[in-house]
Amino acid sequence: MKESSLALKAAEKYLKEMLEADDTANFELYIKRYEEKYLVNFSKESFSDDIKSMHERNGMNTGYEFLGLLRNTKFDDLDVFRTVWKGIYEKRDAVIEMGLYKKNGNWYVIKSAVY
């Protein structure tokens, strides 16, 4: 299977986990796919605050749709594979960007943002 196909499968799997983590306010599930060094300034408290704001603004997630790929980017000498999704929420639709990189045969999240 092509590397980009594997990356897309991983991105969708991780997106599902992160949406579940958002809806259930599960910090451990949310950070599961990040390397610890990229979580230095991200605490359980900041996650909880973010989730409260997201729930007020968006409501709960009811689904998602794949929108497309963005060009890969470099970060810390990592080749970051970027995908864009439509997040379907109770109150509005949003754009979700997921950035993943592969290291030692494993995919990791480097970015997950809801706009």
Image: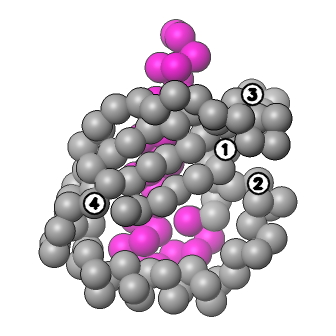
The amino acid beneath tag 2 is Glu
Front: mark 4 or 3 = 4
Which of the 4 image quarters holds residue 39?
A: bottom right
Q: What stretch is highlighted in magenta?
A: 1-30
The crowding category of the residue bearing disc 2, from other C-alpha atoms within 10 Å (few below 14, some 14 to 19, many at least 20), is few
Q: Is residue 85 above or below residue 67?
A: below
Q: Nearer the viewer, residue 26 or 8?
A: 8
Q: Nearer the viewer, residue 20 or 4?
A: 4
According to the picture, the residue beneath numbered tag 1 turns out to be 108
The residues tagged by marks 1 and 3 sit, at their Cα atoms, a distance apart of: 10 Å
The amino acid beneath tag 1 is Tyr
Question: Do the CB atoms of the residues marked 4 and 3 lie less than 8 Å apart?
Answer: no
Overall secondary structure of the magenta stretch?
helix
Q: Nearer the viewer, residue 7 or 17?
A: 7
According to the picture, the residue beneath numbered tag 4 turns out to be 94
> Label 4's element?
strand
Q: Earlier in the sequence, mark 2 or mark 3?
A: 2
The residues tagged by marks 4 and 3 sit, at their Cα atoms, a distance apart of: 31 Å
Q: Which of marks 2 and 1 is nearer the N terminus?
A: 2
> Label 2's element?
loop
Position of 34 with respect to 85 (left or right) is right
The amino acid beneath tag 3 is Gly
